[in-house]
Image (cartoon, rainbow, N blue to C red):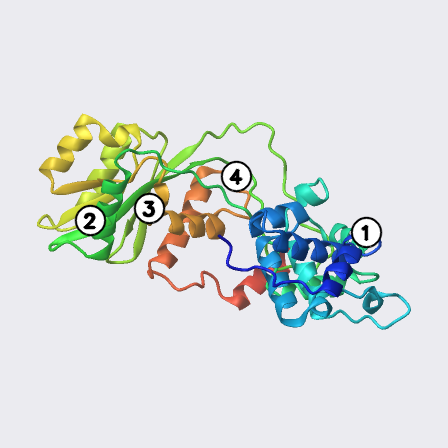
Amino acid sequence: MDTVKARTLRPYEAQKLQSMKRQSTNLVNSRHARIILLSRGGQLKNAETAAYCGCTATWVRRMIHRFNHGGIAAITWYPCYCGDATPRKFVSDIVEQIYEVALSPPKKLIGMSVWSLPKLRKYLQEQGMVGSISLEWLRQTLRRHRIRWRHTKTWKESKDPQFAAKYRRLKRLYARRPKGGRRICVDEFGPLNLQPRHGQHYARIDHVDRLRATYSRKGGVRHMFVAYDMERDTLVGSFTTKKNGVTFLEFLKQLRRRYRRDETLHIILDNATYHGKAEVLQYAATHKIRFYWTPTNASWLNRVECHLRALKRFALENTDYRSHDEQEQAIESYLSWRNGERPISVQQWETYLWYAKKAI
C-alpha cells in the first residue's frame, strides 16, 4: 500500500482539478491534476500513476505532498514566467521539471537513444514547460543539479556456481596477508599490435593531430604476462610471442625466482585454460605456490585490472610504435617509473629544446 495519498478534496478543488485536467495548452497543469485525481481515486498505486502520467514515482509523491500542504496553488504552473515578453525567470517547479525530463528515458519521450541539449530544449518548448531558454543556461542548470554526461559501461554477471565460495576466499585473502606469504595478482595484457593508438594530449592548435592508417599489420603480435605485488605495490611484466601453458610456466618460474624460497606465493588469476595445465599445477605444488581462481566472468575481482588501465593510457595511448622493441621499451619505462625505480624525467628541458631547434 502507498502511504502517500492526496487528502480529501473540497468541492471547489475537485471542480478546479477537473478543469485543469482538460487543459490542452498547459500540459504541466493537466498532468498535475491527473496525479491528484488518480491518487484520490485509490485505484492505482503511485508507480502506476507515474507510468500513466508520463513521469516518475518520485514526482508523483512530491506533487501529492505539495497539494496536501498548499492546495491547488502549490501544484499550478504559470507559463507567464517563461514568456518571451517577460524576463527569463524560472521558478523552482520549472527547474525541477527540467531535471525530471533530462533524467527520463529519451527513447520513450522523443524516440531516440540519447538526449542532446538542443533536443532537450526543443522538447521542453513543445511541451510548454519553457518558452525561451538558451542552451548555455540549460547546460548550467543541469550542471548545478549534478546532471552531467556519463559514459555507460558493460557489466557481465557471473554464472559460476561456485561464485560465493571463490568470492569469500578472495575477500579473506585481500583482507589479511597470509603469514610468511606474498599476495600477487597475475593477468595477461595484450595482444600488442603495431598500430597507431588514439589518445589525448595538451595542444594549442585548432585541429587534431593525425595518425597514419594501418590496413595491413605484418609485424605480428606480442603478449605480456603481468604480476602485481600487493605488499611491495610493484608491477612487473614479461613479454612473449605466444600465450600458452609453456610460456605461462616460464613466467611463473621467473616470478618464483623474485622471492625467497621460504615465502609462499598466493597468486590470484583467472580461469584461462593454460593456467590449469598439469605441468603448471605440478610446479606450483612443489614450489610453494597457491592459486586463487577468480569466478567465471568476474575478472574485476583481480586487483591487477585497475593497474593495467593506467599502463595502457600512459604507455600506449597517443602512440605509433614501428617495432615491438620500441613498444616494449616504452612499457618497461613506464613500469620502472611506476615502481619508483626512476624519476619522472628522462630528459632535461634544456637538452630537449636544443635537439628541437636543431631539428628545425
Instruction: Kindly identify which residue carries mark 3.
Output: 301
Q: Is residue 346 visible?
A: yes
Q: Is residue 103 visible?
A: no
Q: In front: mark 2 or mark 1?
A: 1
Instruction: Kindly identify which residue carries mark 4.
Output: 322
| Residue sitting farthest toward the right | 85
Q: In front: mark 3 or mark 4?
A: 3
Under circle 1, the secondary element is helix
Q: Whole-Å distance between the Cαs marked 3 and 2?
A: 24 Å
- N-terminal of the pair, mark 2 or mark 4, is 2
Q: In front: mark 3 or mark 2?
A: 3
Q: Which mark is residue 126?
A: 1
Q: Whole-Å distance between the Cαs marked 3 and 4?
A: 35 Å
Percent position (x, y) of residue 62?
60, 62
Q: Which mark is residue 290?
A: none
Point 46% across, 29% down: residue: 220
Q: Is residue 142 left or right of residue 348?
A: right
Under circle 2, the secondary element is loop
Characterize the local packing of mark 4: few (<14), some (14-19) or many (20 or more) Cα atoms within 10 angstroms: few
Asked if the residue at tag 4 contacts the one at tag 2, i.e. Cβ–Cβ closer than 8 Å, the answer is: no
Instruction: Kindly identify which residue carries mark 2.
Output: 258
- N-terminal of the pair, mark 4 or mark 1, is 1
Decide: is 264 above or below 252. below
Q: In front: mark 1 or mark 3?
A: 1
Amino acid type, label 4? Arg
Characterize the local packing of mark 3: few (<14), some (14-19) or many (20 or more) Cα atoms within 10 angstroms: some
